[in-house]
Amino acid sequence: MTDLTFDSARLDVRDMDAAEAFYRDALGFQRVFRYDIPDGVIQMMAPGGKPPGVELTMLTDLVPNASPTEHIAFLADDVPAWVERIRSLGYRVEREPFTIGDETMAFVLDPDGHRIELKHYA
């Protein structure tokens, strides 16, 4: 057997251009690939343009339904600065930075309401 390595998490989106703009402009991700398929588009965005990342999926007749409790977490060097960057671009901050033990974290929402956790370990 070989080792397993995390590659991506799928997020369903309504508008691929809006989703790409959020992950590119707010989080600094780059496109890894984009596949235009008969019933939609699948596109991966990741830090540095290499997996692991998020696989954005837009399909005809698919209505994204973001979970109110599930989230994807990314490590951030300066959580408050990232939150201000995201807010300045007009995206929603769901929970301002806070600290628990040795972790500082905050939650923001992408255009489809997916919860994104920004986290820093002291």
Image: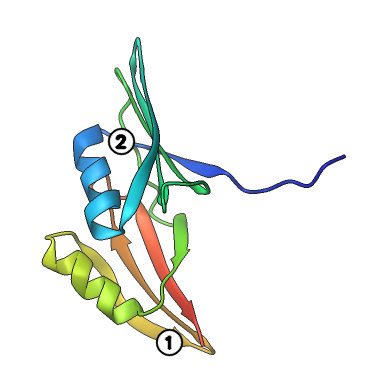
Where residue 117 sits, quadrant-wise, is bottom left
Residue that numbered label 2 is attached to = 13
Where residue 87 sits, quadrant-wise, is bottom left
Q: In this view, does 18 lie to the left or right of 107?
A: left
Residue that numbered label 1 is attached to = 99
Say which residue appears at 78% left-offset and 47% top-offset.
3
Say which residue appears at 20% left-offset and 69% top-offset.
85
SS for dot 1: strand
Say which residue appears at 82% left-offset and 42% top-offset.
2
| Dot 1 amino acid type | Thr
Say which residue appears at 18% left-offset and 59% top-offset.
91
**Few, some or many residues within 10 Å of mark 2 (<14, 14–19, 20+):** many
* Residue 59 against residue 111 in the figure, above or below: above
Tell me if label 1 and label 2 are in contact, CB under 8 Å.
no
Q: Where is residue 118 in the image (x, y as percent from the top left)?
A: 39, 69
Q: Position of residue 88 (x, y in %)?
A: 12, 68
Say if residue 119 shows up in the picture: yes
Mark 1 to mark 2 CA distance (whole Å) = 30 Å
Quadrant of the frame with the N terminus: top right
Label placed on residue 33: none
Where residue 39 sits, quadrant-wise, is top left
| Dot 2 amino acid type | Val
